[in-house]
Structures are given as C-alpha cells and as structure tokens.
C-alpha cells in the first residue's frame, strides 16, 4: 500500500495539488457552514499546533525506531488531523453553541486563504516532510520562511477580527 502512495508523491507537483485540495475543502466547509464553524476551525488549528509542537508526551508515539520514515509521516499527519477535528468539535460545541450567521462570499475567501495558509504552514513546519519529499520552491518560499510563518500566524487573527465585528 505504501508503494502506491509513494508513487503518487513521486510524480507530479503533489504539493501544489494538495494545497489546491486543502483550499477547496476549506472553501466547501465555509460555504456549507456558518461563521462559528469557521472560527472554531481557526482556534482548533492554533490549539493543535501548540499541543503538537510542545506536548512531549506524544513524542514517543511519533518517533519509533521500528517504523519507517513514511509510516511516521502518515502517523503524524493522521494525529494532527484528528487533533484539529477534535478541537474544532469541542470548541464549536462548548464556546459557540449556535451556528452564527452565514458569511458573505468575500469573507469565505478571506478565511479560506487564512485557514489554508495557517494549516499548510504549520503542517510543513511541524511534520518533517522535507526528509521524505522534495517540496517545490514556490511552496517553500510562500509557507516555510521565517517571515511567512509569522504572516500565516497573524492572518487568521486578522480574518477573525473582520468576522467578529459583523457578519
């Protein structure tokens, strides 16, 4: 199974296709849901990033000598996505309760850029993907530089401020 997936990643610019898929998924999520769902997704990305990066109890589960680098990569990816989904559900249920209002199209686009950029930047930084695959220079320049990480950390906060004011 891993060889089939490896063949996909070795062909074509998979990182650009993956980014397009991520942004499309977030865009559909934004169209189908309301403001509070999007805000809970942003908060869950921040919480997942902090816990994934600083909570050292999960390190032994991630770094195993018997597992290959590809298996560790898949486990890290799955764990990160589960954490995001879990936090998004908890935050939505406990903090927001109702669905909020529908968003205008331009606000959905702003949130898609902010959420997708934050997710991509934190994913590329937290998970050592460069040990397995060659990332395109464009993706590296946009998402992994020192200033770019700060930009993608601040952009969702600015997007949330536009949503809190008025939907």
Image: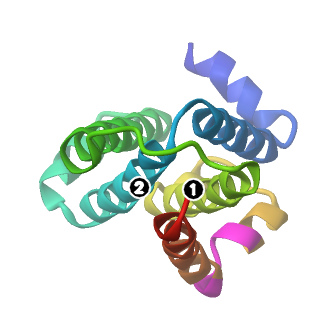
User: What whole-number distance in Å separates the C-alpha atoms at marks 1 and 2?
Assistant: 8 Å
Horizontal and vertical percent position of residue 123: 51, 55
Q: Check whether the beta carbons of the residues at disc 1 and disc 2 lie within 8 A of each other.
A: yes
Which stretch is magenta? Answer: 142-147
- Mark number, residue 53: none
Q: Where, quadrant-wise, is the C terminus in this rendering?
A: bottom right
Q: Is residue 137 above or below residue 22?
A: below
Q: Does the rendering let one see residue 69?
A: yes
The secondary structure type at the circle numbered 2 is helix
Q: Determine which quarter of the picture holds residue 61.
A: top left
Q: Where, quadrant-wise, is the N terminus in this rendering?
A: top right
Which residue is tagged 1?
115
Q: Residue furthest bottom?
A: 147
Which residue is tagged 2?
45
Quick check: is 144 in the magenta stretch?
yes
Quick check: is 132 in the magenta stretch?
no
Horizontal and vertical percent position of residue 91: 26, 47
Sequence-first tag of 1 and 2: 2
């Amino acid at each position: 199974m891993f060889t089939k997936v490896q063949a996909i990643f070795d062909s074509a610019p998979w990182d650009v296709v993956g980014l397009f898929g991520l942004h499309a998924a977030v865009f559909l999520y934004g169209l189908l849901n309301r403001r509070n769902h999007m805000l809970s997704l942003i908060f869950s990305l921040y919480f997942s990033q902090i816990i994934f990066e600083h909570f050292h109890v999960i390190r032994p589960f991630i770094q195993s000598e018997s597992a290959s680098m590809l298996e560790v990569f898949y486990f890290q990816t799955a764990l990160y996505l589960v954490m995001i989904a879990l936090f998004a559900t908890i935050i939505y249920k406990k903090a927001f309760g109702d669905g909020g209002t529908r968003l205008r199209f331009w606000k959905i686009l702003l949130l898609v850029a902010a959420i997708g950029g934050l997710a991509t930047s934190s994913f590329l930084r937290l998970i050592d993907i460069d040990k397995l695959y060659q990332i395109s220079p464009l993706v590296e320049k946009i998402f992994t530089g020192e200033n770019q990480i700060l930009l993608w950390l601040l952009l969702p906060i600015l997007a949330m401020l536009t949503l809190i004011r008025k939907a």
